[in-house]
Amino acid sequence: MIPPTQITFFQRFEADILNGSKTITIRDQAESHYLPDSVVDVLTYEMQRWFAKIRILSVTPITFNQLNQRHASQENMLLSELKEVIREIYPNETALWVLEFELIS
């Protein structure tokens, strides 16, 4: 499988990514194929508008029940908010992946 060269985020997360307060994203199996140390373009999910480049630092499997306050802090939200957002996006998924990243431009 060819690793992805782009990733999308809901527009509501753009400011947190750009100011460095969001440093992870939690995705399902379909979006778990990013490679550590790869650089990817970041686009808004809604409009496919480019707004940044990030370097993927790590891709780590996790279960929904393993999500904790550290993950919530890295997402710049409370743990209850994080779990609610994950359930909105992935209502029945228990196997997830944490993609840690750094903003590079």
Image: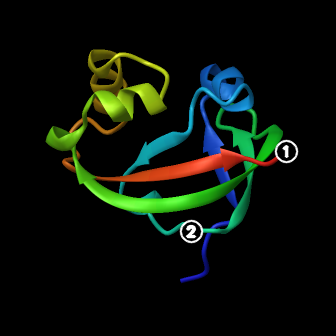
Judging by the rendered image, the residue that carries numbered circle 1 is 105
Q: Are the residues at dot 2 and dot 1 in contact (C-beta closer than 8 Å)?
A: no
Judging depth in this view, the residue of 96 and 71 nearest the camera is 71
Residue 69 sits in quarter: top left
> Considering the numbered disc 1 on the image, is that residue within a helix, a strand or a loop?
loop
In the visual, does 13 lie left or right of 40? left
Q: Earlier in the sequence, mark 2 or mark 1?
A: 2
Furthest residue in direction front, as rendered = 70
Picture residue at 73% right of the left edge, 62% below the top: 39
Return the x and y of residue 50 as percentages of the image width and height.
82, 41
Q: Which residue is mark 2?
A: 36
Q: Is residue 54 above or below residue 47?
A: below
Residue 37 position by quadrant: bottom right
**What colouring method underlies this structural image?**
rainbow
Going by the numbered disc 1, the residue's amino acid type is: Ser
Q: Vertically, is 44 above or below 15? A: below
Residue 51 coordinates in the image, percent (x, y): 82, 37
Q: Is residue 77 above or below residue 63?
A: above
Query: Counting other residues with Cα less than 10 Å from the Cα at mark 1, is it few (<14), some (14-19), or many (20 or more)?
Result: few
Q: What residue occupies the far left of the structure in this picture? A: 65
Estimate how packed mark 2 is, as few (under 14), some (14 to 19) or many (20 or more) residues with alpha carbons within 10 Å.
Answer: some
Secondary structure of the residue carrying numbered label 2 = loop
Looking at the rendered structure, the kind of residue marked 2 is Pro
User: Which residue occupies 64% across, 24% down?
Assistant: 16
Q: Position of residue 85 (x, y in %)?
A: 37, 25
Q: Work out which quarter of the rendered image holds the C terminus and state it.
A: top right
Q: Is residue 33 left or right of residue 5?
A: left
Query: How many angstroms separate mark 2 from mark 1 (CA)?
Result: 17 Å
Residue at the image point whose x is 75% and y is 40% from the top: 48
**Residue 56: percent from the left, percent from the top?**
60, 59
Q: Which mark is residue 75?
A: none
At 28% from the left edge and 26% from the top edge, which residue is drawn?
83
